[in-house]
Image (tube, helix red, strand yellow):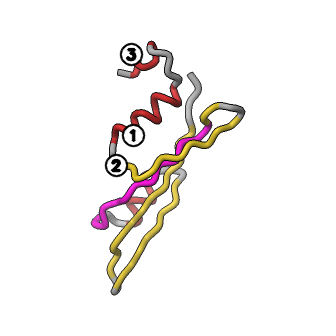
């Protein structure tokens, strides 16, 4: 698939963004542009509350976790993770 998209004239960054969009697990995707090109992709996703917090912390090197609690229970976990884009 990547070979077809690269052949179609898409950059590696554009391919990565399309893959994240098609994944459908992200609530939002943010692009950080540097010198006119995509440098970092940030993805916001909602995490199932059944996962242990320590396990979530181990999944990505660069991430922000937002934990919402109600009546002593975790009701929502949102994660924003950052992915540096490789150059094509």
| Number of residues whose C-alpha sits closer than 10 Å to that of mark 2, classed few (under 14), some (14–19) or many (20 or more) | few
| Residue displayed at 64% across by 31% down | 37
Extreme-top residue of the structure = 7
16 over 70 or under it: above or below = above
Inspect the magenta stretch and tell me whether residue 43 lies in it: yes
Q: Is residue 73 above or below residue 11?
A: below
- What's the distance in space between the residues labelled 3 and 1, CA to CA? 17 Å
Neighbourhood count class around disc 3 (C-alpha, 10 Å): few under 14, some 14–19, many 20 upward: few
Q: CA distance from mark 3 to mark 2?
A: 24 Å
Q: Residue at x 46, y 28 (%)?
A: 15
Overall secondary structure of the magenta section: strand
- Please identify the quadrant where the N terminus is shown: top left
Q: Residues within 10 Å of mark 1 (few under 14, many from 20)?
A: some
Residue 25 placement, left or right of 11? left
Viewer-nearest residue: 26 or 86: 26
Q: Which residue is tagged 2?
A: 25
Q: Position of residue 80 (x, y in %)?
A: 49, 55
Looking at the rendering, the stretch of residues picked out in magenta corresponds to 39-50
Say which label, 3 or 2, has the lower sequence index.
Answer: 3
51 to 32, vertically: above or below: below
Q: Is residue 78 left or right of residue 61?
A: left
Q: Residue at x 39, y 66 (%)?
A: 77
Residue carrying label 1? 21
Q: Which residue is mark 3?
A: 4
């Amino acid at each position: 698939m990547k070979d077809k998209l690269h052949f179609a004239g898409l950059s590696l960054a554009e391919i990565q963004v399309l893959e994240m969009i098609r994944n459908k697990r992200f609530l939002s995707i943010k692009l950080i542009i540097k010198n006119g090109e995509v440098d970092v992709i940030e993805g916001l996703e909602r995490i199932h509350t059944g996962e242990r917090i320590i396990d979530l912390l181990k999944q990505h090197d660069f991430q922000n976790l937002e934990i919402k609690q109600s009546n002593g229970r975790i009701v929502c976990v949102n994660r924003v993770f950052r992915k540096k884009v490789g150059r094509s």
